[in-house]
Image (cartoon, rainbow, N blue to C red):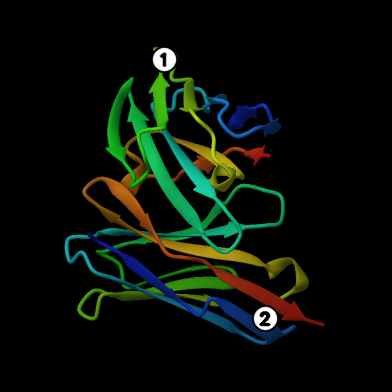
Amino acid sequence: GENVEQHPSTLSVQEGDSAVIKCTYSDSASNYFPWYKQELGKGPQLIIDIRSNVGEKKDQRIAVTLNKTAKHFSLHITETQPEDSAVYFCGGDSNYQLIWGAGTKLIIKP
Amino acid sequence: KAGVTQTPRYLIKTRGQQVTLSCSPISGHRSVSWYQQTPGQGLQFLFEYFSETQRNKGNFPGRFSGRQFSNSRSEMNVSTLELGDSALYLCASSPGASGDNEQFFGPGTRLTVL
């Protein structure tokens, strides 16, 4: 079946540095790629998404880039802060269903 | 608008029992999806209901079932509970199909099977 691979599984960065999480997908028909953030004890929450007619999208310190030819997309967080510590999930749509990546635990070191 | 609510928040059951979890979506949302989350296993998709019809189903045994009512509220049922069913069960609602719409998650129901 279709799948979405996410790397790395754990990422530790110094506060103030940038963090990058990458995902690859298998369904060439995928058009919608969201990123969700899950804080401890809470359900995931959408932080940014991108559709296939756009190559990059930014929202303050976060950005997502999409390369449809290579079938991969990435989440970029600049000037990381302690509140960025969480688990991040990527996803890609396939047959009207969202296929999820396995998640990345982002640790911000003080 | 009120968010997605799930009841109960915590549940303790013993092996062999059955359990029913409830999810009330955001008003106006027609899609409800259910996920199982265990430590280190990410979000495992159980099923999605849209306008009372099951649209998609994940790779779980038939012991896991669900339904959606005309008011979009949804329930999932797990019969003959096993120790491995201990997990956080999340539901999410979206205005349209979950594949290409934002999903709004509830806080989850923490199920412990003893």
Along the line of sight, the residue nearer the viewer: A10 or A65: A10
Q: To which residue does mark 2 refer?
A: A79
Chain that bears disc 2:
A
Residue B53 on image: x %, y %: 29, 24
Q: Residue at the spot x=40%, y=41% of the render? A: B46
Along the line of sight, the residue nearer the viewer: B70 or A78: B70
Q: Quadrant of residue A12?
A: bottom right
Looking at the image, which residue sits at the far right?
A: A110
What is the distance, in whole Å, between disc 1 and disc 2 at their CAs?
45 Å
On screen, residue A4 above or below B106: below
Along the line of sight, the residue nearer the viewer: B1 or A11: A11
Q: Amino acid at mark 1?
A: Phe
Same chain for marks 1 and 2? Answer: no
Mark drawn on residue B69: 1
Judged from the image, the secondary structure of the residue bearing numbered disc 1 is loop
Chain that bears disc 1:
B
